[in-house]
Image (cartoon, rainbow, N blue to C red):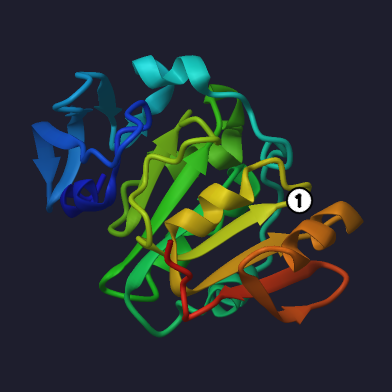
Amino acid sequence: MFLELAEVLDCPDCDESVGLVTFVDRAESRRVVEGRLGCPLCEIEVPIRRGTMRFDLSDAARRATPPAGTEHPAGETAPEAPLRLAALLGVSDRTGMVVLLGPRLAAHAAAIARLGDRLEVLVWLTDAADRSPSGAAVVEDLVAGVDPLLGAAPNRWPIRSGALHGIALAAPIALPLSEITRCARPGARLVVETPTPADLDALAASEFTEVASDATVWVGERSQQVATA
């Protein structure tokens, strides 16, 4: 886990935005290899093991339910697939932070992270069952820029509002679009692979404006003007 990533992490159990504190037992090149995250308010602890944030081993795991559309194992990856996904996310030539949900998209994490010196790729796997042989290699690969996260609750992302430059997931969408929207900064891209008709209806009513689509993918961009209460 990148040490500075703690600046955009929130406690998933607290109703208000409460940042998580990082306790480091072992680090390499500003990457936490062993340690833990802790909430100063409710005092939950999230272990960091081999660089992976293990929300599945924290108190927050009691609320986690596997979201549909992220359980498929990763398969063979075409050489151009990471570059295509990075281009769809709009991060191929800039710094920022993106989330890839599920092992199929996690297979692209290392290649995307290498595209920028300040590009962080948060690899979100639902649970230990997602760590298929190909997916596990990604999780355990502590290349600079890849931040594995395991088992966080899909209905309360442990990420601060407006922190993400891009989010990619595979359909069908079972994650709350409200949480995706909350974590996306103005201008952030949302990439949905193989969206269903129901997904397309939900996306049309969201705060993301379609910028590209075909039979295999839908790409939207969050409005630069964010409504305020």
Whether residue 26 is visible, yes or no, is yes
Q: Quick check: 178 above or below 66?
A: below
- Identity of the amino acid at label 1? Ala
Instruction: Name the side, left or right, on which 216 lies relative to 21.
Output: right
- In front here: 58 or 149? 58
User: Which residue in the structure is indicated by mark 1?
Assistant: 171
Whether residue 106 is visible, yes or no, is no
Tally the marks: 1
Instruction: Identify the residue at horizontal 78%, vertical 47% (top origin).
Output: 172
Residue 70 image position (x, y, % from top left): 67, 41
Q: Quick check: 24 above or below 42?
A: below
Instruction: Identify the residue at horizontal 55%, vertical 72% (top origin).
Output: 189
Residue 129 image position (x, y, % from top left): 60, 24
- In front here: 210 or 110? 210
Instruction: Name the side, left or right, on which 67 lies relative to 95.
Output: right
Classify mark 1: helix, strand or loop: loop
Instruction: Identify the residue at horizontal 39%, vertical 26% (top origin).
Output: 55
Q: Quadrant of the C terminus?
A: bottom left
The image quadrant that residue 213 belongs to is bottom right
The crowding category of the residue bearing disc 1, from other C-alpha atoms within 10 Å (few below 14, some 14 to 19, many at least 20), is: some
Q: Quick check: 188 above or below 36?
A: below
- In front here: 184 or 74? 184
- In front here: 117 or 163? 163
Instruction: Name the side, left or right, on which 6 lies relative to 152.
Output: left
Residue 75 image position (x, y, % from top left): 71, 48
Instruction: Identify the residue at horizontal 25%, vertical 19% (top origin).
Output: 44
The image quadrant that residue 13 belongs to is top left
The image quadrant that residue 116 belongs to is bottom left
Residue 125 image position (x, y, % from top left): 53, 37
Q: Quick check: 30 above or below 150?
A: below
Q: Quadrant of the N terminus?
A: top left
